[in-house]
Amino acid sequence: MDTSSPSVFVNGALMRRYVGQKVRTVIQVIGSDIGSVVGKSTDDLQIVVRGSSPTPPLTTYLEVIGIAESDNAIRAETWTNFGNSFGTHNYNELCKLANGEFKHLFI
Amino acid sequence: MQTSVTPDAISTVLSNPSFDSSSERPEIVVQVVDLKPIGNRYTFSANDGKTRVKAMFTPTLTPEIISGKIQNLGLIRLIDFTVNDISSKSTKYFLVNKCEAVGSVLDSDINLESKSHAEASDPKKQKLEHSPVSPVNDVKTDVCTGITLKPKQEFVAKSASQIMSEQRGNAAPAARMAMTRRVHPLVSLNPYQGNWTIKVRVTNKGVMRNYKNARGEGCVFNVELTDEEGTQIQATMFNDAARKFYDRFQLGKVYYISRGSLKLANKQFKTVQNDYEMTLNENSEVEEASSEEMFIPETKFNFVPIEELGLYVNQKELIDLIGVVQSVSPTMSIRRRTDNEMIPKRDITLADESKKTVVVSLWNDLATGIGQELLDMADKSPVVAIKSLKVGDFQGVSLSTISRSNVVINPESPEAKKLKSWFDSEGKEISMSSIGSGMSPSSKNGSRSMYTDRVLLSHITSNPSLGEEKPVFFSTRAYISFIKPDQTMWYQACKTCNKKVTEALDSGYWCEGCQKKYEECSLRYIMAVKVTDSSGETWISSFNDEAEKILGCSADDLNKLRSEGGEVNEYQTKLKEATWSSHVFRVSVSQNEYNGEKRQRVTVKGVAPLDFAAETRLLLQDISNKNKASQ
């Protein structure tokens, strides 16, 4: 496993802890523009994702991996369509556990 | 928090014949003493520690008194009142139109006069600051004037009998009982404590039941008792005690009870939140506190979000629920299986902030009474809170009222307000899904939820006596780890009745079940499969429908592949494809004898594909439950 460049599971609220670092999150796409996508995080916060988005069509949910530029913006390197149905509540809980009690299990 | 009265409140009141909320007014706080009902209203004496004057609450305040917001010996802030003269006498009284209760109820009348005459002569300095963290300069004032009054102190030494006769006169024995013994809060009771008296309201009363067991026959009934603080306990009476107290205990009335015994509650049957339960015998004392209606315990709710109901399915534990009414069905009549009696039933659908809905079946009087009320107002989306619901697995998750359930429409509680505002702002627009959907596999056993009684395989294999008396059922999530290719995987079955057929001598198949000969038969699975999870592995047997789901093809088709043979064996490939896939199984565990040896037999009753989101939810619940347990 490549552990040289880990990305932290985050929801909207956790982003500000990792500004300048590599993060991974899933958003519900609200709208997209040239060079950016606006989405809703699993904890209902707005996130702007910059970078060259993959060729449309985008699915409802999108996973992005990239550098957190601020507490609500990510410069994405990897974009993955996550389909149109996604357990946002579960993902959000995962983010909380992975940054809280079970942080030691994650890189 | 206000802890005492405004000095000279009464003279302020009497010198301002009336003021209402619009005018400039000083704050006036008085103590309520001698509160008693007259007709539909209550009178009292307003006490400011020096003077008392007769006063009366307007009838609109009666609910506040019945609900216990305004209590005897409590403090109230006057907001709107009118002073009247009683023409026949030279005394005055005032009518309270609007007030609010402040602070907690004191133990006795506030009496400043008897303590010190000095302070009365200088009322402006009179300050009743009992807060332990009062500012320093306040303390100084108190010290220099020597006034530190505590409402709880008795200022004049009196004998107990004097106090009793003064306060109670020739009151009912129940009242005397309250005076002679300290009333204990229910929460303080334990099995090792002898002499107590409790003052409680009967908030539920069971029916008298007759039982028969090894030690003979008898009768029993129980009541649920709630005290002023809202603590509940269940009390049980057997035989003579049951007969003695059955008529005495009346729902909704308040009693003094003493000389009962406590023991640890049987968790299996407990219906109220209390570690103990009470048994009353013939010698226990139960006296109605008829003259007192000063408190009504509010029903204490312990709401479970609809989203989390899955955890309670088919458990003995009863739950409380609050939700917005989405729909109300007409009443139906259901024939009870045990005695063929027709019982009315009505289904209501409730939703909450977890964006899930659930169906609650109201039975009997709740269906016809409060159910009708709900039907009439269903378009207004009322909030209902229901105490004590049983969680069943019909249609995944369903709720039913039982005899002691309690339904409150639009309760005055913070939860209800929050829910209502959520519904008004966003809830009514979003689409919600039923909590039960996705929880039941679409098999014959569809009424069973796959998310209940979930166990690991080791739970089944580690207990060889499981299912000894009758088969027990579990749900488990496991991988298919091995399907033996050279087993007898199917049998020749009658196309009509699915029973085993034998090949007839000439041609065709003879069915013993139908007593008939058929030209054709079909193959039906009876397949042994090894399943594995993180805790262990076991063999399970699966019949036709379940095996078809596991393998993804019918026995007839698989038989064709098997007979084809060849280098690349399609039959082997099919079995391999089915291996290492994960399913949720509903299994029955039973014992059968084989060569004089008892063996556990695990049979698949249902197979469902994994719903990853639902499984994750279960895992998250497990994590949070484990954390709770380890704390």
Image: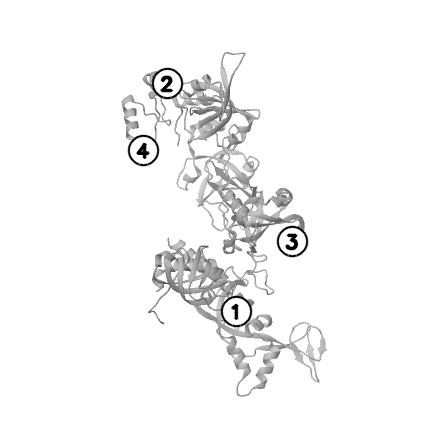
Q: Earlier in the sequence, mark 3 or mark 1?
A: 3
Same chain, labels 2 and 3: yes
Q: Could you give the CA–CA distance between mark 3 and mark 4, rounded to whole angstroms?
A: 65 Å
Is the residue marked by circle 3 packed among few (<14), some (14-19), or many (20+) residues within 10 Å?
A: few
Most extreme residue toward the right is B516
For the residue marked with disc 1, what is the amino acid? Arg
Q: Amino acid at mark 3?
A: Arg
Q: Secondary structure at mark 1?
A: strand
Numbered disc 4: what chain? B
Task: Identify the subunit bearing mark 2.
Answer: B
B388 or B217: nearer the viewer: B388
Image quadrant assignment for residue B191:
top left
Do circles 4 and 1 both sit on a common chain? yes
Q: Which dot marks residue B133?
A: 4
Between B304 and B277, the one nearer to me in the picture: B304
Q: Residues within 10 Å of mark 2 (few under 14, many from 20)?
A: few
Which labelled disc corresponds to residue B615?
none
